[in-house]
């Protein structure tokens, strides 16, 4: 991949990684045309990716937009999973991407059937868990999350619940043409491969993604960058004209005469004080 390929397609390329990608040279990744990164942050109620904090800082240093995902474990307490992600990630920083609720491993979700005997309530329990995590993380982190899942997960596990359409879709679908599941009508991010090999990550396969838009479009999914500080106003010409020097000389003479009359002040001190006052006047008058 390179920048030219991305611009022709009208998409931006990116990757997502975890501690499984053991060595990463971010400058080489960026030079390869990859323009955003998602890092694994947390999993379940207690796990933190050991490389998360360091790689978050490295992505900022490389000027790569970076987002973070939580691998959801449905059999664990929901509040613990919310707290785990929020405590690890904290408030999102300028330029960072939306957080992600990573929904996969369908077998774990099917195991929730023991909680309720009726299928309708089982489905609603699943949906409520996702909604609760997304709403809480949005409130804590400042941006609405993305939902990551496959078409089969949306269909079979979440029943294409319309409640989830309020969050943008990161689709996992390894096909030439992606299948977008209801309730969504389009994908925002698309993980199109789980076995990419790229410069900068020599030892491992890596997930490859597209973003459906331009760099300008991507900014809608980032925390706004801090504005550049305004340029200082141009300084006025501080050169002292000959006329100002004559005026200052007169001021020095008058001040000297006055200071000589000051009790206990010798003539040298009076002259020095007069010069200092005159120069101060000169500098301030040239700036106004």
Image (spheres, rainbow, N blue to C red):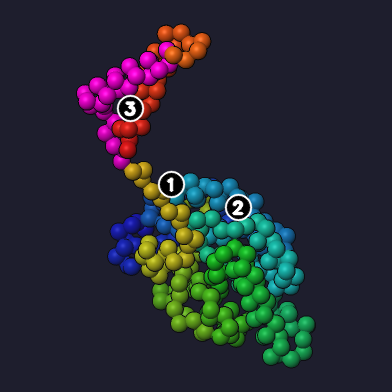
- Secondary structure type for disc 2: helix
* Crowd tier of the residue under label 2, counting other residues whose Cα lies within 10 Å: few below 14, some 14–19, many 20 or above: many
Q: Is residue 227 above or below residue 124?
A: above
Q: Residue drawn 58% across and 83% down?
A: 163
Q: Is residue 94 above or below residue 161?
A: above
Report the residue marked by disc 2: 52
Mark 3 vs mark 1, foreground winner is: 3
> What quarter of the picture does the C terminus occupy?
top left
Residues in magenta, as a range: 234-260
Q: Residue drawn 33% across and 27% down?
A: 282
Q: Is residue 242 left or right of residue 91?
A: left
Q: Is residue 146 left or right of residue 10?
A: right
Q: Position of residue 133 (x, y in %)?
A: 65, 71
Report the residue marked by disc 1: 27
Task: Say if residue 104 shows up in the picture.
Answer: no
Task: Say if residue 215 shows up in the picture.
Answer: yes
Q: Nearer the viewer, residue 76 or 255?
A: 255
Asked whether residue 258 is drawn in magenta, I would say: yes
Closer to the N terminus: mark 1 or mark 2? 1
Q: Main secondary structure of the magenta part?
A: helix
**Alpha-carbon distance for marks 3 and 1?**
53 Å
- Secondary structure type for disc 1: helix
Closer to the N terminus: mark 2 or mark 3? 2
Closer to the N terminus: mark 3 or mark 1? 1
Q: Residue drawn 38% across and 53% down?
A: 32
* Crowd tier of the residue under label 1, counting other residues whose Cα lies within 10 Å: few below 14, some 14–19, many 20 or above: some
Q: Nearer the viewer, residue 68 or 216?
A: 216
Number of the label disc, if any, that sits on residue 282:
3
Q: Position of residue 64 (x, y in %)?
A: 45, 53
- Secondary structure type for disc 3: helix
**Alpha-carbon distance for marks 1 and 2?**
18 Å
Mark 2 vs mark 3, foreground winner is: 3
């Amino acid at each position: 991949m390179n920048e030219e390929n991305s611009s022709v397609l009208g998409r931006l390329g990116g990757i997502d990684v975890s501690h499984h990608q053991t060595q990463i040279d971010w400058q080489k990744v960026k030079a390869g045309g990859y323009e955003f990164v998602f890092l694994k942050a947390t999993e379940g109620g207690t796990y933190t990716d050991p490389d998360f904090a360091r790689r978050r800082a490295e992505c900022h240093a490389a000027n790569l937009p970076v987002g973070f995902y939580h691998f959801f474990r449905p059999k664990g307490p929901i509040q613990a999973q919310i707290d785990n992600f929020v405590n690890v990630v904290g408030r999102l920083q300028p330029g960072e991407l939306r957080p992600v609720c990573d929904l996969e491993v369908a077998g774990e979700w099917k195991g929730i059937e023991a909680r309720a005997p009726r299928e309708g309530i089982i489905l609603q329990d699943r949906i409520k868990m996702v909604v609760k995590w997304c709403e809480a993380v949005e409130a804590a982190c400042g941006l609405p999350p993305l939902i990551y899942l496959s078409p089969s997960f949306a269909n079979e596990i979440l029943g294409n619940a319309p409640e989830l359409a309020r969050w943008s879709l990161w689709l996992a679908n390894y096909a030439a043409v992606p299948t977008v599941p209801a309730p969504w009508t389009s994908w925002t991010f698309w993980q199109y491969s789980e076995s990419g090999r790229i410069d900068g990550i020599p030892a491992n396969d890596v997930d490859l993604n597209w973003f459906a838009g331009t760099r300008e479009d991507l900014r809608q999914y980032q925390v706004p960058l801090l504005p550049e500080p305004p340029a200082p106003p141009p300084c006025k010409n501080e050169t002292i004209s000959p006329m100002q020097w004559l005026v200052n000389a007169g001021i020095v003479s008058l001040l000297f005469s006055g200071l000589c009359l000051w009790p206990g002040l010798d003539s040298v001190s009076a002259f020095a004080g007069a010069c200092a006052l005159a120069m101060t006047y000169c500098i301030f008058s040239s700036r106004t």
